[in-house]
Image (tube, grey):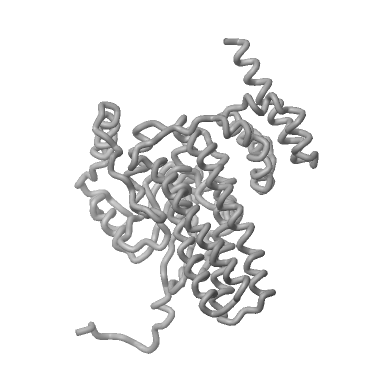
Amino acid sequence: MSEFINNHTQRKEKLKNALQQIHDGKPYEDVKETFAEVLREATVQEIAEIEEALIKEGLPVEDIQYLCDVHVAMFRESLDQQEVPEMTPGHPVYTFRAENELANLVLNESRQLLEKFKNNPSGQNRDDLLAGIEKLKECNNHYERKENLLFPYLEKTGFTGPSSVMWGIHDDIRAAWKKIIRLLSEKSDFTEKEARGIDALFTPMENAIREMFYKEDRILFTNALERLTDADWLAIHSQEDEFGFSFTKRGSEWPQEDATLVNANKKQDEKTSERTIPMNDFPLTTGDLTLSQIDLMLTTLPVDITFVDENDTVRYFSEAADRIFKRAPAIIGRKVQNCHPPQSVDKVLEVVEDFRANKRDSAEFWIQMGEKFVHIRYFAMRDAAGNYRGTLEVSQDIAAIRKLEGEKRLLDE
């Protein structure tokens, strides 16, 4: 056993050293040749642990994201040799993989439409390509389920690397298809040079999507199946409808009512019953309410509310009928640092740290989301002694409010 542990540790150190050399500029082909034997022996778990170690040792997430393709290229031979577990239709991993198979077909179709557009940038070919990219955007459901369901459960096991690295790649892909759609929507007549410009945006996006198929299948899903329990997968399964699916419907053969899943369901039911809302009154600053009344008030307000406590842990979100930003119970207990993509997390943390240091009491932002104009406000929550007790995020679609004029003093008929 000690020999196995020593070999495992030595292999990790050599692999980590190889990646560090890549980061320092050494050609990865040279590094691969030097560590070829070690690379062949590396497991998916070791690869993931190495990525985690580099992040924890201070290598910026942006650099990890940039090097991610190089890392996969180094380990591809090892990854290709590892068996991919068969799953049952309905299991979250089966659904993820099915979506990737179909997304690959949609991506191929989009590439064909782009080639037609490049050869003849007519209005009809432009329309067909635009429809193809709009269809490709359905991949976003797949990405959102990863970000809001799979990542939180993996983080609870200490596996945090994918949350930052993959989320950043998702956002790069989203930015690319949004830009392509915007350019194609601005006009109907394109020159061949402009059509090649669309290709220059599409190709790196296409490569990133295809590489993500591989990284998910060979690294992310393999690690998830190794780390997550049946109860975790059931919890993910129960929340998937909130985000929807890409190009397919979820299968119905999983979960099966075997002993393991029955016990997992029983534990989930017991946990739910423990959260039964008591009906006794609670004295507040002004008046007193039951917890049931408080819960109804929070879900009736025409705003999205999310509360992060003084330890940067998400403790609550309101389940309004028409939420602006999708939320799922998986977010409860998650660190706020992991709830935002790398491109925006620094701004959120800056606000929280300013609240903690008593530099400000609120912050606000506003963004255009299609027809919605979303006003986002952050408020510092402090107790009677002025101690920071958390951050309250309040988001509201104010598009209709901005259009109001004059007065209205009577009810509509």
Toward the viewer: 176 or 313? 176
Task: State the image coordinates of residue 170 (x, y, percent, origin top left).
Answer: 55, 53
Would residue 164 be found to the left or right of residue 397 on screen? right
Q: Quadrant of the N terminus?
A: top right
Would residue 279 be found to the left or right of residue 8 on screen? left
Q: Quadrant of residue 234?
A: top left
Q: Is residue 243 visible?
A: no
Residue depicted at 43% across the width and 41% down the height: 333
Toward the viewer: 7 or 125? 125
Toward the viewer: 320 or 30? 30
Residue depicted at 64% across the width and 47% down the height: 65
Toward the viewer: 143 or 231? 143
Rendered position, 282 above or below 185: above
Q: Is residue 400 visible?
A: yes
Residue depicted at 37% across the width and 42% down the height: 236
Would residue 191 be found to the left or right of residue 242 on screen? right
Q: Quadrant of the C terminus?
A: bottom left
Residue depicted at 75% across the width and 40% down the height: 23
Rendered position, 213 above or below 7: below
Would residue 52 be found to the left or right of residue 234 on screen? right
Task: State the image coordinates of residue 183 (x, y, percent, origin top left).
Answer: 59, 74
